[in-house]
Amino acid sequence: MSHRLPNGGRLIRRGKPQSFTFNGKRMTGYAGDTLAASLLANGQTLVGRSFKYHRPRGIVASGVEEPNALVGLGRGDRYEPNQRATTTEVFDGLVAESQNHWPSLDLDLLSVNNLLPQFLTAGFYYKTFLQPRAFWKHVYEPIIRRSAGLGKAPDDKARDPDRYEQIYAFCDVLIIGGGIAGLQAALSAAQSGARVALWEQTAHWGGRAPVDGVQIDGKPAQNWIKTTVEALEKMNNVHLRLRMMGAGVHDHGYVLGYERITDHAPATQAPRHRLWRMRAGHIITATGAIERPLSFAGNDVPGVMLAAAMRDYLVNYAVAAGNSVVVVTNNDDAYRTAIALRKAGLGVPAVIDARAEANGALPQEARALGLRVLTGRGVRKVKGGKRVKGVEICRIDSAGTAHSEVFDCDAIAMSGGWSPVVHLWSHCGGKLTWDTNGHFFRPDPNRPPTGADGAGFVTVCGAANGVMSAVLADAHAAVVTALGRQDLPMPAQDQLPEEDPLEPVWIMPRRAEYPLRAKMWLDYQNDVKVSDVQLAAREGYQSVEHTKRYTTLGMATDQGKLSNINGLAVLSDALGQPIPATGTTTFRPPYTPISLGAIAGEARGAVFQPLRRSPLHDWHAANGADWEPVGQWRRPFTYKRPGESRDQAVNREVRNAREAVSLLDASTLGKILVSGPDAGRFLDMLYTNMMSTLKPGKCRYGLMCNENGFLMDDGVVARIDEQSFLVHTTSGGADHVHGWMEDWLQCEWWDWKVHTVNLTEQFAQIAVVGPKARLLLERLGGMDVSADALPFMDWRAGQLGGFDVRAFRISFSGELSYEIAVPASQGAALWERLMTAGADLGIMPYGTEALHILRAEKGFIMIGDETDGTVIPQDLGLNWAISKKKTDFLGKRGMEREAMVNPDRWKLVGLETLDGSVLPHGALALGKGKNANGQAVTEGRVTSTYFSATLGRGIAMGLVAQGPERMGEELIFAGPQDKRIKTRIVDPVLYDKEGARQNV
Amino acid sequence: MLLLTCPYCGVTAEETEFSAGGEAHLTRHGPGSSDHDYEAYMFNRKNPRGVHFERWRHAYGCGKWFLAARDTMTLEVLATYPAQTSEPPAEVIAKIKLKRPDWEGYP
Amino acid sequence: MSEIMRSALPGAEFTGFVQVSEAGLQGMITLRADLAAPQLATALKSATGCAMPKTRKITRDGAHSLVWMSPDELMILCPHAEAPALTDRLSREMAGAFVTLANVSDARAMFRVTGAMWRDALAKLCPVDFASLQTGDIRRTRAAQVAAAILVTDAQEAQIICFRSVAGYMFDLLSIAAAPGAEPALYV
Ligand SMILES: [Zn+2]
């Protein structure tokens, strides 16, 4: 059984016990422990159940590559599933629970899946669920949802109370990985004077060198690590970060770093995670290597662990994975574990070495300690269910039909060699090469990812580069190459005993028969076995990417960190080709999963997206505004009075504008100053009608089209003086139209003398609307607003009630109307003055819905309702606003196309239901017969539809095939639930057709 | 995410500060143009595998439109230059040739 | 008139590891012109006391500043009450030249971010290398999802200008970025 040793543990502080719970059971660890170390110290070898078969699983690794020890952490609003126990630092009060079992971890009834493994082989889903279809929903899916999976999603009522943030950072050289290679790279880079950042994903510097007994300049690595970190901390040009994972390398030196700030100290004020958006001139990855498991039957039984991980637990945390450990290997490195265990006083019954001979320095040392080394042997199978009880040994070249020897043990350390962590190199296109000595893929320095200048921007060093000794020299060389600096101080020298080459062993024993292969796990997390990959190959899968998806190999949350190379090797063997010919799957960021909170950063709650407020926003909010989003603006839809429904409020507002006087906040309308000697000529190109002939003091309505001829925006242009115009755009269109103007001025007509200035937010604009509007303005005193002094479609600058204003006699309601523009800082004051002055006239504000109804009663179009990006002005009966004199304007050529002059186009009409009801939004008019797809033919659609309080019935506009020629004709519109609505085609102007009311 | 240098204000900034505007050096064909020319102007785009000329606006900066020569395969930015030109300037062409000797040239 | 004029977020203030405050009414005039024209430099010097700024620089004389916005655009900073008259004066003096002036004082909001760690706060919102910005520099960029201009006024302070309508968003952003305990220790 796993347990804590009385002495040792370089990372733990025994004086600081930490109390936590696992599945409700109280346990104690030490500060510095990972949760995995604490669990093992408490004898908890069983930590979870597997994805498909519900097999008992234990801790395999000691770092980010851990596939099994996924736990749910925290509770309530802070519950988070699928967290790796191996990268979770233990703290007082930590709450963890195991996953994917029912009813309990120890007794999992769903492990019956384990007895029927042939049901869940590669492609099982594809093969099984084809027929009968009804079984999908009612039988298969509920069963699978119940039994397959990892952690539970948090409760849908849960709201993450933690804070997250992002930060942009810049450096010349970013080094990812704070082992001895990364530290040396940082030191060399820093000595060049470059701005350096160094990131380490764990809470400690130095990586595994201290565990592996590396000597630097004749002393333990820890001495050098301490000195080097201290030196780096003192340098102003170096930025060091622990608990910071290099999550992804992206184009042009963009790197995402995932900093876990308070995961280990949840009571602090700091944000929980911070996502670093780093732009690096050059990136050096010193990300180390990950040990590979060996594929033998029962290699997933709790107690089977990677040899180096077992060493980590022993040296770093003083935790023994068992009392009696059999070591299985194909290389010399695993002997370090055997030696360390033995020196710690633990039992090591045997070292099983697949190689014919093992005579390197480490095996010799092991033998000298009295360890029994069996060469040319492998594991036939592991004995035990919920934990290792023993191991059967056989000849490595056999079929494993019988064992040659059996050892009792409670843990097994396995090592299949090492794979460099090439993820970050590969994310942005760095290519790999197969190392025939080390039997792994390593970065090909001749094919790096390339940046903005076309040069490679990632260099790899240390174990990530496939370099297992003289690591410091390799790191230094990486810096010299990256920076082109030959003058940097030489690094210290690291030493390790020489190692003999490993011998690749992809299946143990090599000729294992099916019953054994069906118990050899490649991908622990997704429950993919050697036999699954072999089956896929037999069924014709050749591409590694296809095999991955068919078998789900490497598709779990660990992204196959342990399984990839072993899986590739098995596939290659099955296909009878060398591993490089099979290639690897694509490495994609993030390196390990990162929190959604970090990805969202600050963008949540009130600042999820920008909210634009008009200068009158606070007044609206204080006076019952029922808000409507208009782009990023919030505009009052209506102002509800106590006891009123939304509809009642809207109807009241419509009637008041027609009968008395009302105010509308029109501040969101775009206002663009277009100025310069060529301003008139420019506007003639932008608008379909003539603007250059407009006289100062006058206003003109105009249409803007894109080059397709499709209507883009509309509004009123006011000529300010000889050289300048004020262009009004729609509320949503201001930024787009301004950008559109600048595009043409900068990129096409760059010799024209025109300036544009977006003045949208400089002014609050208040529409004073209704038959009593003039009376109200006269009460304020100041400029002459009489019909003679300020006629319809004129504008004047002057004073009203002491405010400097521009008054525009324009109307979007059909009523007598003035739009008063005042500097935004005075908007609220003017609005309040108007409200006070008009109190006895029945003044009230109206919102966007009343605005829409008022304009629809008048048959005025609205961009976005009557237009959808495929509508030309002619479709809307706006031919009068299209100049016939101008030889050119934007969109003119587009309107001349055959499809645009087709008489059958859908055109604007008014629509009147025979029963007075309100047509549904977007309803379609049914034509005769069916189209080629068997669908009903349509011949029109509703574009705007409202209840008109003025007319006391539903009103609508729509686009109907040849509509204007069909006045009075009846149409059938399709409503919900197959309702058919009889409707008559009418003139779109339903109120005051002569326009008498606005022109008084 | 790309890095681009605005030739007007000299700022090198990440892609999020710019907005992309499609292919550069299109010739506008207005009223009176043939269907063929109009179609080429509006719809036909080169979409090359390799050197590409494109429009960018320094939208969150100085607001100016500029042009970029960029390799669509490697994402290398070969040059950025002001938009007030109907074809790539000679020095831009020379710069590209230097880096891509087998480039077929403009157009 | 002063009691009827309101800046975008009067009195808004937040104290975290830096101080965030709305700067109140601030005169701002957009000027678009050929910035190399000698007549323009003379008119600006006499009206504001400021020299023509170089690319991405700010020149200052007392309450007046000239801020480089683009190759053909400056922003003139002046007392709010002075902006209309100064706009008119410069328009008159530059009459006949291809120059456009517009008072945009009310179209914008200004915030001060004060404290030694202002770079650390802004680095959370803007994709800018703040080590490259020194006193007298202007950088137009974005803060999270909106446009912003950052004016470095001295070692302890930066000013942020954004559109008036998003003043609330900007204030919230800056306050979140400056939250106590969220010091990233990047620049200091
Ligand atoms: Zn720029």
Image (spheres, coloured by chain):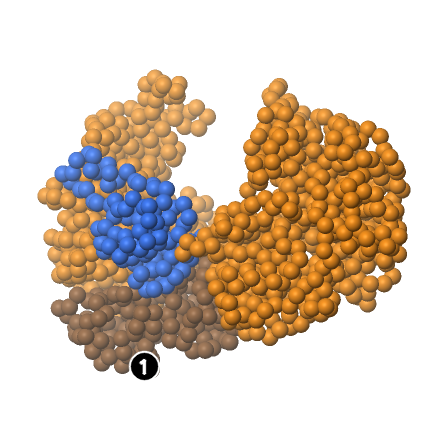
Please tell me in which quadrant of the rendered image residue C152 appears: bottom left
**Residue drawn at the location 62% of the way across and 44% of the way down:** A436
Which of the pair A461/A605 is nearer the observer? A461
Question: Can you give x and y, in whole percent of width and height, for residue A448 in the image?
Answer: 49, 51
A765 left or right of A510 in image:
left
> Which residue is disc 1 drawn over?
C61
**Residue drawn at the location 12% of the way across and 45% of the way down:** A886
Query: Is residue A229 depicted above or below A872 in this figure?
Result: below
Q: Colour of chain A?
A: orange
Q: Colour of chain C?
A: brown
Circle 1 chain = C
Which of the pair A68/A640 is nearer the observer? A68
Could you classify mark 1 by the number of other residues whose Cα lies within 10 Å: few (under 14), some (14-19), or many (20 or more)? few
Q: Which chain is blue?
A: B
**Residue drawn at the location 22% of the way across and 71% of the way down:** C36
Which of the pair A6/C5 is nearer the observer? A6
Q: Is residue A684 visible?
A: yes
Residue sitting at the far top: A929
Identity of the amino acid at label 1? Asp
Q: Is residue A42 visible?
A: no
